[in-house]
Image (spheres, rainbow, N blue to C red):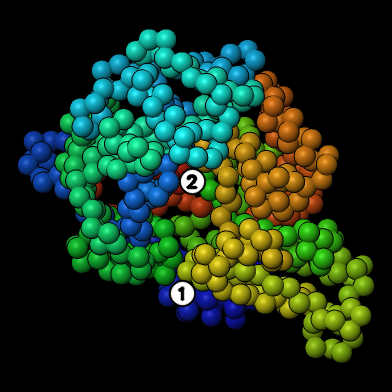
């Protein structure tokens, strides 16, 4: 086993993780398939109200800014949507086409759709939405739009300032949801959460509760659930207690590590899960004077046995990392980009080669009179990362590295990451919002102009730029794989796990399918019902 049993027992006690196998009689499914038929006449008499324990507030009314990432798509639809398997599917557009030069995209819009306020959905509404975001200074894909056309009521044409193969993917995210034209004010702000989605917002008491009702005119058919009540319960243990007591009917598995085992032992609670598109990683600032050594980064990676720790500690919440991206990304994931294997002997050899040794016999390495001390930043409220940081600290100590773990709140953590003022940090793998993860390299981590810029060179910049400008799918896949191989060899990140999307619910919830998109955790409510 890659980490010491003493550390293991301590973590299990500290996290209240008392059993690592499901108890008999407990319902656990990889993903509940949608009901293929309408509920029985008996089920139809059951009140179709679902109470959900959610750890974050609604946040706001605008899907492009402040509204919760987990709620947007219940109210708003985009031109292009992401399906249950994280693939592009028709949304408010039934089809779309890219011009040969990659600079013009033509969308054929769905007919007969209305916003929740009765306003018609058409090409004019699409143009108003894009223009409002442009005029309001929204970043991202909107900055690449040069002009738009509405040749007829249900044809919408977007002209880009540069070729962009990923445009359909880039707009298939909840922040690009279409808002009723009447819900924008003169300052481009959204004044009411009015979309075309399966549910419509009924009320909102900030940080307490928000409710939705079914949209009877939803273009894919009215949901069977007539009312959703979201109770804001930030603490995972409190949410779990509310689920067991019947105060709520359902909760997601986000931030619920310490309560998951208790719920798994309750035969009245069902666990629905599928692997999601997001992963967790240790990101390394390769521009830090100490971490700039690729041999040191390789040694740190070789000293960490995350697969064993993840399987033992996180159980249903995650799967040990298999590649540079989650397997959800399919053909985009390079099979040649091999993650570093756990090999403490290799770690020791690399460190010795760098001139580190234990001259005073205290078990810690030093060079030039300085102990090899590294710092790891961790979100103090992320239970999974807190558990794995303790494991990492113990494993690095076994090869002579003194790892100092600093717990921060989210705001302080992001501030240090954006300022590049850190050595290592545990964080979710960002900038992969849709099926094509190209912007992960340029906007996120591996380009001189990327936000985090963990590792970049002029040659890597050129490769990433080539990928972003390519209009050939096969060439793009080759470039994806080449980039992943090169980046993995440089170890700017240590992949820890791929996150599962988990729903915990009482036995009355039926027909719920768990989507692979993390932000789509509640997508199954479109088809679910109470029985």
**Residue 503 drawn at (x, y percent):** 35, 52
Q: Of helix, strand and loop, which one carries label 1?
A: helix
Whichever of callouts 2 and 1 sits on the residue coming sooner in the sequence is: 1
Kindly indicate the quadrant of the structure image that contains residue 404. Answer: bottom right
Q: Name which residue lies at 52% across and 76% down.
A: 11
According to the picture, the residue beneath numbered tag 2 turns out to be 276
According to the picture, the residue beneath numbered tag 1 turns out to be 15
In this view, the residue in front, 511 or 98, is 98
Q: Name which residue lies at 90% across and 71% down.
A: 352
Above/below status of 33 relative to 249: above
Above/below status of 204 relative to 413: above
Answer with left or right where residue 49 lies relative to residue 74: left
Kindly indicate the quadrant of the structure image that contains residue 465. Answer: top right
The quadrant in which the C terminus is found is top left
Q: Name which residue lies at 23% across and 40% down.
A: 200
Q: Name which residue lies at 39% across and 61% down.
A: 22
């Amino acid at each position: 086993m890659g980490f010491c049993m003493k550390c293991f027992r301590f973590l299990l006690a500290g996290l209240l993780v008392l059993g690592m196998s499901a108890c008999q009689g407990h319902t656990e499914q990889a993903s509940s398939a949608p009901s293929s038929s309408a509920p029985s006449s008996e089920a139809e008499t059951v009140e179709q109200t679902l109470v959900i324990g959610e750890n974050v507030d609604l946040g706001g009314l605008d899907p492009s800014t402040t509204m919760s990432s987990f709620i947007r798509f219940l109210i708003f639809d985009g031109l292009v949507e992401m399906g249950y398997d994280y693939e592009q599917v028709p949304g408010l557009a039934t089809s779309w086409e890219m011009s040969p030069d990659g600079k013009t995209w033509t969308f054929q819009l769905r007919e007969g759709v209305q916003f929740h306020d009765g306003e018609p959905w058409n090409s004019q509404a699409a143009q108003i939405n894009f223009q409002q975001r442009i005029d309001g200074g929204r970043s991202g894909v909107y900055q690449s739009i040069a002009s738009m056309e509405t040749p007829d009521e249900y044809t919408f044409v977007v002209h880009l300032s540069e070729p962009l193969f990923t445009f359909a993917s880039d707009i298939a995210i909840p922040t690009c949801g279409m808002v009723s034209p009447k819900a924008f004010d003169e300052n481009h702000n959204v004044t009411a959460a009015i979309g075309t989605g399966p549910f419509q917002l009924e009320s909102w008491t900030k940080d307490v509760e928000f409710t939705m009702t079914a949209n009877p005119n939803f273009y894919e058919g009215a949901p069977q659930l007539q009312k959703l009540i979201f109770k804001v319960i930030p603490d995972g243990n409190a949410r779990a207690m509310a689920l067991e007591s019947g105060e709520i009917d359902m909760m997601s598995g986000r931030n619920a590590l310490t309560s998951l085992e208790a719920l798994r032992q309750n035969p009245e609670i069902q666990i629905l899960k599928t692997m999601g598109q997001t992963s967790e990683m240790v990101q390394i600032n390769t521009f830090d004077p100490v971490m700039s050594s690729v041999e040191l980064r390789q040694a740190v990676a070789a000293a960490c046995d995350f697969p064993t720790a993840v399987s033992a500690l996180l159980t249903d919440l995650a799967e040990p990392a298999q590649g540079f991206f989650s397997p959800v990304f399919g053909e985009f994931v390079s099979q040649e980009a091999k993650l570093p294997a756990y090999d403490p002997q290799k770690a020791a050899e690399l460190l010795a080669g760098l001139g580190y040794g234990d001259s005073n016999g205290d078990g810690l390495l030093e060079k030039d009179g300085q102990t090899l001390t590294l710092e790891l930043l961790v979100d103090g409220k992320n239970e999974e990362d807190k558990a794995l940081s303790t494991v990492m600290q113990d494993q690095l100590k076994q090869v002579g590295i003194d790892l100092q773990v600093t717990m921060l709140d989210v705001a302080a953590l992001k501030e240090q990451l954006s300022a590049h003022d850190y050595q290592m940090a545990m964080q979710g793998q960002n900038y992969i919002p849709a099926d094509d993860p190209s912007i992960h390299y340029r906007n996120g981590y591996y380009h001189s102009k990327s936000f985090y810029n963990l590792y970049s060179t002029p040659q890597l910049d050129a490769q990433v730029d080539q990928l972003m400008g390519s209009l050939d799918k096969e060439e793009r896949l080759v470039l994806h794989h080449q980039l992943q191989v090169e980046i993995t060899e440089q170890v700017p990140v240590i992949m820890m796990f791929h996150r599962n999307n988990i729903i915990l619910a009482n036995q009355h919830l039926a027909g719920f399918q768990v989507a692979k998109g993390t932000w789509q955790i509640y997508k199954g409510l479109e088809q679910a019902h109470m029985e």
